[in-house]
Amino acid sequence: MNNNKRENSKNNPTAIVIFGGTGDLSKKKLLPALFHLYIEGFLPEVFRVIGISRKELSDENYRKLVEEAIVAKGHEHGKELIGKFLENIYYKKGCSGESCTYEDLSYLLLKLDAEAGMCMNKLFYLSVPPSSYGDIFKHLSASGLNTPCGGEGAGWARVLVEKPFGENLETAKALDSQLTAFFKEEQIFRIDHYLAKDAVQNLLAFRFSNLLFEDSWHNGDIEKVHIKLYENFGIEGRGSFYDESGALRDVGQNHMLQILALIAMENQGVFEPENIIKERAKVFQALKIYSQEEAAVNSVRAQYKGYLDTEGVLKDSKTETYFLVKAFIENERWKGVPFYLESGKALGESKVEIVVEFKAAPHCVCGDEDSHNHKNILTLSIQPKQAVEMKFWVKKPGMAFKLEEQSLKFEYEKEKNGNGQNINRLPDAYEKVLYDCIAGDRTLFATSGEVEAAWKFIDPIIMTWKRGSPELDFYEIGEKPKIDL
Ligand code: BG6
Protein backbone atom coordinates (compact mmCIF):
# COMPACT_ATOMS: atom_id res chain seq x y z
CA MET A 1 0.00 0.00 0.00
CA ASN A 2 2.70 2.43 1.03
CA ASN A 3 4.56 2.57 -2.27
CA ASN A 4 7.86 3.46 -0.54
CA LYS A 5 7.87 0.14 1.22
CA ARG A 6 7.48 -1.91 -1.92
CA GLU A 7 10.46 -3.46 -3.59
CA ASN A 8 11.13 -2.02 -7.00
CA SER A 9 9.70 -4.70 -9.25
CA LYS A 10 11.71 -3.57 -12.30
CA ASN A 11 15.05 -4.26 -10.61
CA ASN A 12 13.89 -7.48 -9.08
CA PRO A 13 15.04 -10.23 -11.46
CA THR A 14 12.67 -13.10 -10.87
CA ALA A 15 12.09 -16.64 -12.05
CA ILE A 16 8.41 -17.57 -11.74
CA VAL A 17 7.80 -21.30 -11.45
CA ILE A 18 4.20 -22.38 -11.99
CA PHE A 19 3.26 -25.82 -10.65
CA GLY A 20 0.18 -26.71 -12.67
CA GLY A 21 1.50 -24.69 -15.60
CA THR A 22 -0.89 -26.25 -18.13
CA GLY A 23 -4.00 -26.18 -15.92
CA ASP A 24 -7.12 -24.10 -16.26
CA LEU A 25 -6.05 -21.34 -13.89
CA SER A 26 -2.73 -20.97 -15.70
CA LYS A 27 -4.33 -20.76 -19.11
CA LYS A 28 -7.23 -18.53 -18.17
CA LYS A 29 -5.61 -16.27 -15.62
CA LEU A 30 -1.91 -16.58 -14.78
CA LEU A 31 -0.28 -16.64 -18.21
CA PRO A 32 -2.43 -13.82 -19.64
CA ALA A 33 -1.84 -11.85 -16.41
CA LEU A 34 1.94 -12.23 -16.75
CA PHE A 35 1.76 -11.09 -20.35
CA HIS A 36 -0.25 -8.05 -19.37
CA LEU A 37 2.21 -7.14 -16.66
CA TYR A 38 4.96 -7.52 -19.24
CA ILE A 39 3.43 -5.17 -21.81
CA GLU A 40 2.56 -2.60 -19.16
CA GLY A 41 6.14 -2.67 -17.88
CA PHE A 42 5.28 -4.12 -14.47
CA LEU A 43 7.37 -7.27 -14.70
CA PRO A 44 11.05 -7.20 -13.72
CA GLU A 45 13.34 -6.36 -16.61
CA VAL A 46 14.88 -9.81 -16.18
CA PHE A 47 12.27 -12.50 -15.70
CA ARG A 48 11.71 -16.13 -16.64
CA VAL A 49 8.55 -18.24 -16.41
CA ILE A 50 8.83 -21.99 -15.96
CA GLY A 51 5.69 -24.09 -16.34
CA ILE A 52 5.61 -27.50 -14.67
CA SER A 53 3.01 -30.20 -15.22
CA ARG A 54 2.74 -33.91 -15.91
CA LYS A 55 2.33 -33.38 -19.63
CA GLU A 56 5.11 -34.32 -22.02
CA LEU A 57 5.87 -30.97 -23.66
CA SER A 58 8.92 -29.24 -25.09
CA ASP A 59 9.67 -25.56 -24.41
CA GLU A 60 8.34 -24.89 -27.91
CA ASN A 61 5.06 -26.75 -27.28
CA TYR A 62 4.61 -24.87 -24.02
CA ARG A 63 5.28 -21.51 -25.66
CA LYS A 64 2.55 -22.37 -28.16
CA LEU A 65 0.17 -23.10 -25.28
CA VAL A 66 1.09 -19.79 -23.64
CA GLU A 67 0.56 -17.92 -26.90
CA GLU A 68 -2.87 -19.51 -27.33
CA ALA A 69 -3.80 -18.56 -23.77
CA ILE A 70 -2.80 -14.94 -24.45
CA VAL A 71 -4.61 -14.78 -27.78
CA ALA A 72 -7.73 -16.39 -26.27
CA LYS A 73 -7.91 -13.40 -23.89
CA GLY A 74 -8.24 -11.16 -26.92
CA HIS A 75 -4.97 -9.28 -26.51
CA GLU A 76 -4.54 -7.06 -29.51
CA HIS A 77 -0.76 -7.09 -29.44
CA GLY A 78 1.28 -8.04 -32.45
CA LYS A 79 3.16 -11.28 -32.90
CA GLU A 80 6.45 -9.51 -32.25
CA LEU A 81 5.58 -8.48 -28.71
CA ILE A 82 4.16 -11.89 -27.87
CA GLY A 83 7.27 -13.47 -29.43
CA LYS A 84 9.55 -11.40 -27.18
CA PHE A 85 7.55 -12.42 -24.11
CA LEU A 86 7.68 -16.10 -25.15
CA GLU A 87 11.50 -16.01 -25.25
CA ASN A 88 11.34 -15.98 -21.45
CA ILE A 89 9.14 -19.06 -21.13
CA TYR A 90 10.38 -22.57 -20.29
CA TYR A 91 8.83 -25.92 -19.46
CA LYS A 92 9.64 -28.93 -17.27
CA LYS A 93 7.67 -32.13 -17.10
CA GLY A 94 7.30 -33.20 -13.51
CA CYS A 95 5.30 -34.51 -10.61
CA SER A 96 4.88 -32.88 -7.21
CA GLY A 97 6.00 -36.03 -5.36
CA GLU A 98 9.07 -37.00 -7.44
CA SER A 99 12.47 -35.78 -6.33
CA CYS A 100 13.83 -35.95 -9.90
CA THR A 101 11.40 -33.12 -10.80
CA TYR A 102 13.14 -30.84 -8.32
CA GLU A 103 16.61 -31.91 -9.39
CA ASP A 104 15.66 -31.00 -12.97
CA LEU A 105 14.12 -27.75 -11.81
CA SER A 106 17.18 -26.79 -9.73
CA TYR A 107 19.38 -27.53 -12.67
CA LEU A 108 17.27 -25.40 -15.01
CA LEU A 109 17.13 -22.52 -12.51
CA LEU A 110 20.91 -22.63 -12.04
CA LYS A 111 21.37 -22.59 -15.79
CA LEU A 112 19.00 -19.64 -16.21
CA ASP A 113 20.78 -17.78 -13.40
CA ALA A 114 24.15 -18.45 -15.04
CA GLU A 115 22.89 -17.27 -18.45
CA ALA A 116 21.48 -14.10 -16.90
CA GLY A 117 24.67 -13.64 -14.89
CA MET A 118 22.80 -13.09 -11.64
CA CYS A 119 20.95 -14.79 -8.84
CA MET A 120 17.28 -14.37 -9.64
CA ASN A 121 14.52 -14.37 -7.04
CA LYS A 122 12.40 -17.49 -7.11
CA LEU A 123 8.63 -17.28 -7.01
CA PHE A 124 6.79 -20.62 -6.81
CA TYR A 125 3.11 -20.48 -7.75
CA LEU A 126 1.23 -23.55 -6.55
CA SER A 127 -1.68 -23.82 -8.94
CA VAL A 128 -2.35 -27.42 -7.89
CA PRO A 129 -4.72 -29.05 -5.35
CA PRO A 130 -3.73 -28.31 -1.73
CA SER A 131 -3.18 -32.04 -1.20
CA SER A 132 0.06 -31.60 -3.21
CA TYR A 133 1.32 -28.61 -1.20
CA GLY A 134 3.07 -30.71 1.46
CA ASP A 135 5.06 -32.68 -1.14
CA ILE A 136 6.03 -29.61 -3.12
CA PHE A 137 7.17 -27.69 -0.04
CA LYS A 138 9.17 -30.65 1.25
CA HIS A 139 10.94 -31.19 -2.06
CA LEU A 140 11.60 -27.49 -2.67
CA SER A 141 13.21 -27.33 0.73
CA ALA A 142 15.21 -30.55 0.22
CA SER A 143 16.59 -29.12 -3.04
CA GLY A 144 17.55 -25.88 -1.29
CA LEU A 145 15.13 -23.90 -3.43
CA ASN A 146 13.53 -22.26 -0.40
CA THR A 147 16.72 -20.17 -0.05
CA PRO A 148 17.74 -19.02 -3.53
CA CYS A 149 21.34 -19.04 -4.62
CA GLY A 150 22.32 -20.60 -1.34
CA GLY A 151 22.30 -17.44 0.77
CA GLU A 152 20.08 -15.17 2.82
CA GLY A 153 21.23 -11.92 1.24
CA ALA A 154 20.95 -12.72 -2.44
CA GLY A 155 17.45 -12.85 -3.90
CA TRP A 156 14.41 -14.30 -2.23
CA ALA A 157 12.18 -17.35 -2.49
CA ARG A 158 8.41 -16.93 -2.11
CA VAL A 159 5.46 -19.22 -2.57
CA LEU A 160 1.99 -18.29 -3.72
CA VAL A 161 -0.73 -20.69 -2.60
CA GLU A 162 -4.38 -20.83 -3.58
CA LYS A 163 -7.42 -21.59 -1.45
CA PRO A 164 -8.96 -23.80 -0.10
CA PHE A 165 -6.84 -23.48 3.03
CA GLY A 166 -8.27 -26.57 4.70
CA GLU A 167 -11.90 -27.58 5.04
CA ASN A 168 -12.26 -26.72 8.74
CA LEU A 169 -10.13 -25.30 11.53
CA GLU A 170 -8.35 -28.56 12.21
CA THR A 171 -7.34 -29.29 8.61
CA ALA A 172 -6.38 -25.63 8.08
CA LYS A 173 -3.98 -25.85 11.03
CA ALA A 174 -2.54 -29.11 9.70
CA LEU A 175 -1.99 -27.56 6.27
CA ASP A 176 -0.37 -24.56 7.85
CA SER A 177 2.08 -26.59 9.83
CA GLN A 178 3.05 -28.34 6.59
CA LEU A 179 3.67 -24.98 4.96
CA THR A 180 5.59 -23.42 7.81
CA ALA A 181 7.79 -26.48 8.35
CA PHE A 182 9.79 -25.55 5.25
CA PHE A 183 9.09 -21.89 4.51
CA LYS A 184 8.96 -18.93 6.87
CA GLU A 185 5.62 -17.15 7.23
CA GLU A 186 6.96 -14.10 5.39
CA GLN A 187 7.76 -16.30 2.38
CA ILE A 188 4.17 -17.59 2.10
CA PHE A 189 1.60 -15.55 0.18
CA ARG A 190 -1.95 -16.95 0.63
CA ILE A 191 -4.12 -15.77 -2.21
CA ASP A 192 -7.66 -14.55 -1.80
CA HIS A 193 -8.22 -13.17 -5.26
CA TYR A 194 -11.12 -11.03 -3.98
CA LEU A 195 -8.68 -8.95 -1.94
CA ALA A 196 -6.77 -8.27 -5.15
CA LYS A 197 -9.81 -6.99 -7.03
CA ASP A 198 -9.54 -3.31 -7.74
CA ALA A 199 -13.10 -2.66 -6.59
CA VAL A 200 -12.47 -4.45 -3.30
CA GLN A 201 -9.42 -2.28 -2.63
CA ASN A 202 -11.63 0.68 -3.39
CA LEU A 203 -13.60 -0.17 -0.25
CA LEU A 204 -10.68 1.11 1.80
CA ALA A 205 -10.14 4.17 -0.36
CA PHE A 206 -13.82 5.02 -0.26
CA ARG A 207 -14.20 4.50 3.47
CA PHE A 208 -11.10 6.23 4.68
CA SER A 209 -11.00 9.18 2.28
CA ASN A 210 -14.55 10.41 2.76
CA LEU A 211 -15.23 11.92 6.13
CA LEU A 212 -18.90 12.06 5.22
CA PHE A 213 -19.19 8.29 5.46
CA GLU A 214 -16.48 7.45 7.96
CA ASP A 215 -18.20 9.61 10.54
CA SER A 216 -21.39 7.57 10.23
CA TRP A 217 -19.70 4.20 9.93
CA HIS A 218 -20.93 2.61 13.17
CA ASN A 219 -23.90 1.02 14.89
CA GLY A 220 -25.33 4.43 15.83
CA ASP A 221 -26.06 5.21 12.18
CA ILE A 222 -25.97 1.92 10.29
CA GLU A 223 -28.86 -0.52 10.55
CA LYS A 224 -27.49 -3.42 8.54
CA VAL A 225 -24.94 -4.46 5.94
CA HIS A 226 -25.70 -6.98 3.20
CA ILE A 227 -22.85 -8.57 1.26
CA LYS A 228 -24.06 -10.37 -1.86
CA LEU A 229 -22.13 -12.67 -4.18
CA TYR A 230 -24.64 -13.95 -6.72
CA GLU A 231 -23.74 -16.14 -9.69
CA ASN A 232 -26.07 -17.06 -12.52
CA PHE A 233 -24.19 -20.25 -13.42
CA GLY A 234 -23.95 -23.64 -11.78
CA ILE A 235 -21.11 -25.95 -10.84
CA GLU A 236 -19.72 -26.47 -14.35
CA GLY A 237 -17.31 -29.38 -14.26
CA ARG A 238 -16.38 -28.95 -10.59
CA GLY A 239 -18.94 -31.44 -9.23
CA SER A 240 -16.79 -33.55 -6.96
CA PHE A 241 -14.80 -30.61 -5.52
CA TYR A 242 -17.91 -28.52 -4.95
CA ASP A 243 -19.96 -31.32 -3.47
CA GLU A 244 -17.34 -31.74 -0.73
CA SER A 245 -17.07 -28.02 -0.22
CA GLY A 246 -20.46 -26.30 -0.61
CA ALA A 247 -21.08 -22.59 -1.07
CA LEU A 248 -20.23 -21.44 2.45
CA ARG A 249 -16.76 -22.98 2.40
CA ASP A 250 -16.22 -22.07 -1.25
CA VAL A 251 -16.84 -18.32 -1.05
CA GLY A 252 -18.18 -17.51 2.43
CA GLN A 253 -15.19 -18.55 4.54
CA ASN A 254 -12.82 -16.48 2.40
CA HIS A 255 -13.97 -13.90 -0.16
CA MET A 256 -17.06 -12.72 1.68
CA LEU A 257 -15.48 -12.56 5.12
CA GLN A 258 -12.58 -10.61 3.63
CA ILE A 259 -15.06 -8.09 2.23
CA LEU A 260 -16.75 -7.93 5.62
CA ALA A 261 -13.39 -7.27 7.27
CA LEU A 262 -12.63 -4.37 4.90
CA ILE A 263 -16.06 -2.87 5.53
CA ALA A 264 -15.72 -3.18 9.29
CA MET A 265 -12.02 -2.64 10.08
CA GLU A 266 -10.58 0.34 11.91
CA ASN A 267 -8.21 2.85 10.38
CA GLN A 268 -5.07 3.22 12.46
CA GLY A 269 -4.10 6.17 10.32
CA VAL A 270 -0.93 4.45 9.14
CA PHE A 271 -1.46 2.71 5.85
CA GLU A 272 1.26 0.07 6.07
CA PRO A 273 0.66 -3.58 5.18
CA GLU A 274 1.17 -4.75 8.76
CA ASN A 275 -1.44 -2.28 10.07
CA ILE A 276 -4.04 -3.22 7.50
CA ILE A 277 -3.47 -6.93 8.04
CA LYS A 278 -3.65 -6.49 11.81
CA GLU A 279 -6.90 -4.53 11.63
CA ARG A 280 -8.51 -7.01 9.24
CA ALA A 281 -7.54 -9.84 11.57
CA LYS A 282 -9.13 -8.04 14.54
CA VAL A 283 -12.47 -8.06 12.71
CA PHE A 284 -12.19 -11.79 12.06
CA GLN A 285 -11.42 -12.36 15.71
CA ALA A 286 -14.39 -10.26 16.84
CA LEU A 287 -16.93 -12.32 14.86
CA LYS A 288 -19.54 -13.80 17.15
CA ILE A 289 -19.07 -17.57 17.24
CA TYR A 290 -22.44 -19.29 17.30
CA SER A 291 -23.69 -22.09 19.47
CA GLN A 292 -25.68 -24.72 17.57
CA GLU A 293 -28.98 -23.08 18.51
CA GLU A 294 -27.73 -19.68 17.36
CA ALA A 295 -26.32 -21.08 14.11
CA ALA A 296 -29.70 -22.66 13.32
CA VAL A 297 -31.59 -19.36 13.59
CA ASN A 298 -28.94 -17.18 11.96
CA SER A 299 -28.49 -19.14 8.74
CA VAL A 300 -30.45 -20.67 5.88
CA ARG A 301 -29.23 -22.89 3.06
CA ALA A 302 -30.61 -24.21 -0.19
CA GLN A 303 -29.71 -26.28 -3.24
CA TYR A 304 -30.74 -25.59 -6.81
CA LYS A 305 -32.97 -28.17 -8.47
CA GLY A 306 -30.97 -30.28 -10.89
CA TYR A 307 -27.75 -30.00 -8.87
CA LEU A 308 -27.91 -33.72 -8.05
CA ASP A 309 -27.64 -34.58 -11.76
CA THR A 310 -24.21 -32.92 -12.00
CA GLU A 311 -21.29 -35.28 -12.63
CA GLY A 312 -19.32 -35.90 -9.43
CA VAL A 313 -22.21 -34.96 -7.11
CA LEU A 314 -23.61 -37.62 -4.77
CA LYS A 315 -27.17 -38.59 -5.64
CA ASP A 316 -28.40 -37.82 -2.11
CA SER A 317 -26.12 -34.82 -1.55
CA LYS A 318 -27.22 -32.22 0.97
CA THR A 319 -24.55 -29.74 -0.11
CA GLU A 320 -25.75 -26.14 -0.22
CA THR A 321 -25.38 -24.10 -3.40
CA TYR A 322 -26.92 -21.08 -1.66
CA PHE A 323 -26.64 -19.64 1.82
CA LEU A 324 -27.67 -16.62 3.79
CA VAL A 325 -25.87 -16.13 7.10
CA LYS A 326 -26.33 -13.34 9.60
CA ALA A 327 -23.04 -12.43 11.27
CA PHE A 328 -22.34 -10.10 14.17
CA ILE A 329 -19.11 -8.36 15.10
CA GLU A 330 -18.67 -8.06 18.83
CA ASN A 331 -16.92 -4.77 19.22
CA GLU A 332 -17.94 -1.30 20.20
CA ARG A 333 -18.34 0.01 16.67
CA TRP A 334 -20.51 -2.81 15.34
CA LYS A 335 -22.33 -4.36 18.29
CA GLY A 336 -25.89 -5.19 17.26
CA VAL A 337 -25.48 -4.54 13.50
CA PRO A 338 -26.29 -7.63 11.42
CA PHE A 339 -23.96 -8.36 8.52
CA TYR A 340 -25.81 -10.56 6.03
CA LEU A 341 -23.61 -12.77 3.87
CA GLU A 342 -25.53 -14.17 0.92
CA SER A 343 -24.28 -16.19 -1.99
CA GLY A 344 -25.61 -18.67 -4.48
CA LYS A 345 -24.97 -20.47 -7.73
CA ALA A 346 -27.57 -20.68 -10.52
CA LEU A 347 -29.35 -17.54 -9.36
CA GLY A 348 -31.08 -15.16 -11.75
CA GLU A 349 -28.11 -12.79 -12.03
CA SER A 350 -24.38 -12.47 -11.42
CA LYS A 351 -23.34 -9.61 -9.20
CA VAL A 352 -21.21 -8.81 -6.20
CA GLU A 353 -22.21 -5.86 -4.09
CA ILE A 354 -22.32 -4.50 -0.59
CA VAL A 355 -25.46 -2.73 0.51
CA VAL A 356 -25.11 -0.52 3.57
CA GLU A 357 -28.46 0.49 5.00
CA PHE A 358 -28.39 3.54 7.25
CA LYS A 359 -30.93 4.15 9.99
CA ALA A 360 -33.81 6.51 9.30
CA ALA A 361 -33.09 10.12 10.28
CA PRO A 362 -34.33 10.57 13.87
CA HIS A 363 -36.23 13.80 13.22
CA CYS A 364 -37.19 13.48 9.61
CA VAL A 365 -38.94 16.40 7.89
CA CYS A 366 -41.07 13.94 6.01
CA GLY A 367 -44.40 15.63 5.64
CA ASP A 368 -47.15 13.25 6.63
CA GLU A 369 -45.23 10.15 5.63
CA ASP A 370 -43.84 7.52 7.94
CA SER A 371 -40.29 8.62 8.74
CA HIS A 372 -39.10 5.04 9.27
CA ASN A 373 -38.98 4.39 5.55
CA HIS A 374 -36.64 7.27 4.84
CA LYS A 375 -33.29 5.63 4.95
CA ASN A 376 -30.13 6.23 3.02
CA ILE A 377 -28.83 3.22 1.16
CA LEU A 378 -25.24 3.04 -0.03
CA THR A 379 -24.46 0.34 -2.60
CA LEU A 380 -20.84 -0.45 -3.38
CA SER A 381 -20.80 -2.62 -6.50
CA ILE A 382 -17.80 -4.82 -7.08
CA GLN A 383 -18.91 -6.59 -10.27
CA PRO A 384 -20.00 -6.85 -13.03
CA LYS A 385 -19.76 -3.06 -12.84
CA GLN A 386 -17.65 -1.11 -10.41
CA ALA A 387 -19.95 1.52 -9.06
CA VAL A 388 -20.98 3.50 -6.01
CA GLU A 389 -24.59 4.51 -5.55
CA MET A 390 -26.17 6.54 -2.78
CA LYS A 391 -29.91 6.73 -2.33
CA PHE A 392 -31.23 9.76 -0.52
CA TRP A 393 -34.44 11.69 0.00
CA VAL A 394 -35.45 15.06 -1.43
CA LYS A 395 -38.62 17.08 -1.62
CA LYS A 396 -40.74 16.18 -4.61
CA PRO A 397 -41.27 19.36 -6.64
CA GLY A 398 -44.78 20.70 -6.30
CA MET A 399 -47.16 22.35 -3.88
CA ALA A 400 -47.40 19.43 -1.48
CA PHE A 401 -44.61 18.63 0.94
CA LYS A 402 -43.80 15.10 -0.13
CA LEU A 403 -40.49 13.26 -0.31
CA GLU A 404 -39.11 11.18 -3.12
CA GLU A 405 -36.08 8.94 -3.38
CA GLN A 406 -33.24 9.95 -5.69
CA SER A 407 -29.77 8.59 -6.23
CA LEU A 408 -26.23 9.67 -6.95
CA LYS A 409 -24.29 7.12 -8.94
CA PHE A 410 -20.73 6.79 -10.06
CA GLU A 411 -19.67 4.07 -12.52
CA TYR A 412 -16.04 3.57 -13.44
CA GLU A 413 -16.88 2.24 -16.86
CA LYS A 414 -18.61 5.47 -17.77
CA GLU A 415 -15.32 7.36 -17.48
CA LYS A 416 -14.42 7.76 -21.16
CA ASN A 417 -11.72 9.67 -22.99
CA GLY A 418 -12.27 11.90 -26.04
CA ASN A 419 -12.44 8.83 -28.32
CA GLY A 420 -15.15 7.22 -26.24
CA GLN A 421 -12.78 4.60 -24.81
CA ASN A 422 -12.78 3.65 -21.15
CA ILE A 423 -10.02 5.54 -19.40
CA ASN A 424 -9.87 3.07 -16.56
CA ARG A 425 -8.52 -0.34 -17.41
CA LEU A 426 -9.20 -2.51 -14.39
CA PRO A 427 -6.29 -4.86 -13.82
CA ASP A 428 -7.25 -8.49 -13.38
CA ALA A 429 -6.94 -9.68 -9.77
CA TYR A 430 -4.21 -12.15 -10.76
CA GLU A 431 -2.08 -9.37 -12.22
CA LYS A 432 -2.23 -7.67 -8.84
CA VAL A 433 -1.48 -10.92 -6.99
CA LEU A 434 1.67 -11.56 -9.06
CA TYR A 435 2.75 -7.94 -9.04
CA ASP A 436 2.39 -7.55 -5.27
CA CYS A 437 4.12 -10.83 -4.52
CA ILE A 438 7.13 -9.77 -6.63
CA ALA A 439 7.13 -6.40 -4.85
CA GLY A 440 6.89 -8.14 -1.46
CA ASP A 441 3.69 -6.31 -0.51
CA ARG A 442 1.63 -8.61 1.73
CA THR A 443 -1.32 -6.24 2.20
CA LEU A 444 -3.70 -8.10 -0.08
CA PHE A 445 -2.89 -11.62 1.05
CA ALA A 446 -4.63 -13.61 3.77
CA THR A 447 -2.68 -14.54 6.88
CA SER A 448 -2.91 -17.84 8.74
CA GLY A 449 -4.54 -15.97 11.66
CA GLU A 450 -7.35 -14.71 9.42
CA VAL A 451 -7.84 -18.11 7.85
CA GLU A 452 -8.12 -19.80 11.26
CA ALA A 453 -10.43 -17.15 12.72
CA ALA A 454 -12.67 -17.50 9.65
CA TRP A 455 -12.92 -21.27 10.20
CA LYS A 456 -13.79 -20.72 13.87
CA PHE A 457 -16.80 -18.73 12.68
CA ILE A 458 -17.80 -21.08 9.85
CA ASP A 459 -17.28 -24.49 11.53
CA PRO A 460 -20.23 -24.35 13.99
CA ILE A 461 -22.58 -23.31 11.18
CA ILE A 462 -21.53 -26.20 8.97
CA MET A 463 -21.72 -28.61 11.90
CA THR A 464 -25.26 -27.45 12.68
CA TRP A 465 -26.25 -27.89 9.02
CA LYS A 466 -24.83 -31.41 9.07
CA ARG A 467 -27.20 -32.16 11.93
CA GLY A 468 -30.07 -31.05 9.68
CA SER A 469 -30.81 -27.64 11.10
CA PRO A 470 -32.14 -25.51 9.48
CA GLU A 471 -33.46 -27.85 6.81
CA LEU A 472 -32.05 -27.65 3.31
CA ASP A 473 -34.40 -25.77 0.99
CA PHE A 474 -34.57 -26.08 -2.81
CA TYR A 475 -34.84 -23.49 -5.56
CA GLU A 476 -35.39 -23.36 -9.29
CA ILE A 477 -32.42 -22.53 -11.52
CA GLY A 478 -32.50 -18.81 -12.26
CA GLU A 479 -34.52 -17.93 -9.16
CA LYS A 480 -33.52 -16.91 -5.67
CA PRO A 481 -34.66 -19.24 -2.87
CA LYS A 482 -37.75 -17.94 -1.12
CA ILE A 483 -36.26 -18.12 2.34
CA ASP A 484 -35.14 -15.32 4.59
CA LEU A 485 -33.75 -14.56 8.01
C1 BG6 B 1 -13.84 -18.98 -6.39
C2 BG6 B 1 -14.89 -20.01 -6.13
O1 BG6 B 1 -12.95 -18.88 -5.31
O2 BG6 B 1 -14.46 -17.72 -6.60
C3 BG6 B 1 -15.88 -20.07 -7.28
O3 BG6 B 1 -14.27 -21.28 -5.97
C4 BG6 B 1 -16.46 -18.70 -7.56
O4 BG6 B 1 -16.93 -21.00 -7.02
C5 BG6 B 1 -15.33 -17.69 -7.71
O5 BG6 B 1 -17.23 -18.79 -8.74
C6 BG6 B 1 -15.88 -16.29 -7.84
O6 BG6 B 1 -14.82 -15.45 -8.22
P1 BG6 B 1 -15.03 -14.31 -9.31
O7 BG6 B 1 -13.76 -13.55 -9.33
O8 BG6 B 1 -15.35 -15.01 -10.60
O9 BG6 B 1 -16.20 -13.51 -8.83
Image (tube, rainbow, N blue to C red):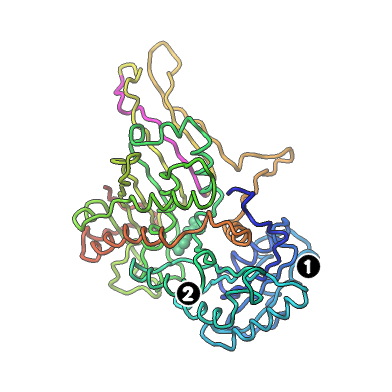
Query: Furthest residue to the top?
Result: 399
Magenta run includes residue 156? no
On the image, the x and y values in percent for residue 52 come to 61, 78
Q: Residue at x 49, y 81 (%)?
A: 135
Image height check: is 133 above or below 364? Answer: below
On the image, the x and y values in percent for residue 393 come to 42, 25
Q: Nearer the viewer, residue 97 or 304?
A: 97
Q: Residue at x 67, y 84 (%)?
A: 107
On the image, the x and y values in percent for residue 371 come to 31, 24
Left or right: residue 321 versus residue 44 is left
Image height check: is 74 above or below 378? Answer: below
Label 2 to label 1: alpha-carbon separation: 31 Å
- Residue numbers of the magenta segment: 369-383
Q: Are marks 2 and 1 in contact (CB under 8 Å)?
A: no
Secondary structure at numbered mark 2: loop
On the image, the x and y values in percent for residue 48 come to 70, 71
Q: Nearer the viewer, residue 235 or 331?
A: 331
Residue 129's mark? 2
Left or right: residue 54 versus residue 225 is right
Residue identified by numbered label 1: 84
Q: Amino acid at mark 2?
A: Pro
Dot 1 alpha-carbon crowd within 10 angstroms: few under 14, some 14 to 19, many 20 or more: few
Rendered image quadrant of residue 216:
top left
Query: Furthest residue to the left?
Result: 293
Q: Nearer the viewer, residue 12 or 191?
A: 12
Rendered image quadrant of residue 23:
bottom right
Q: Amino acid at mark 1?
A: Lys
Q: Earlier in the sequence, mark 2 or mark 1?
A: 1
Left or right: residue 420 versus residue 125 is right
